[in-house]
Image: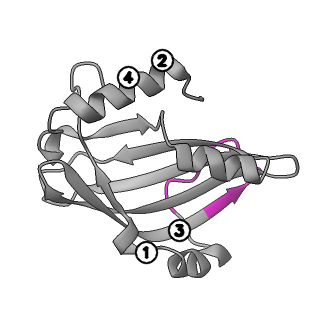
Amino acid sequence: FEAGDEEVQEVQQLVTTGVPAGPPAQWAGLWRVSYAPHIRTLGSLGFTKFDVYYDIAPSAAASPEISSFVRFEGPFWRGWLNSSGTISTLSEDEVQVDFQNFWVDWDSEQPRRSGSDFFSEIAKKFFFLELSRFPVLSLDTSEG
């Protein structure tokens, strides 16, 4: 999925008029990232398309569990880049994602729910908690 001009305008409107996302208990579900210009730029540099999904587990805890599944397809490679960890609420409209586990599923149609491989230790060295703060400006629980 690649966001077009209409989707970009909708996201920009949400950013300026968005409402707080609500409590973490309402975040559960599988979410598809529809607008991530930095991911699109990164993909174009490597002639690779990315499709990003977040699976947030239902939780009454203050830090829900999250899994990230990133489908990648390039000229000579395809598969999934995966990670899992927790989400912490920093304020009403900002969260921090702390990924602790990383794994890759090469040439696979579906990602594994969990795993560990050679890339785990390498990926951990490139994950910076300071760069994992994200605005959460709007959440429509009726529409998803």
Q: What element carries label 4?
A: helix
Rendering quarter of residue 139? top left
Span of residues in magenta: 104-114
Residue in the foreground of this view, choosing between 37 and 105: 37
Q: Name the residue under label 3.
A: 102
Residue in the foreground of this view, choosing between 63 and 47: 47
Residue 19 appears at what percent x and percent y?
15, 32
Q: Mark 2 points at which residue?
A: 6
For this view, does 92 lie left or right of residue 45? left
Residue 68 appears at what percent x and percent y?
47, 52
Disc nearer the start of the sequence (3/1): 3
**Residue 133 position (above or below residue 75):** below
Residues packed near mark 1 inside 10 Å, few (<14), some (14 to 19) or many (20 plus) = few
State the CA–CA distance, disc 2 to disc 4: 6 Å
Q: Name the residue under label 1.
A: 128
Question: Which numbered disc, 1 or 2, marks the residue closer to the eye?
Answer: 2
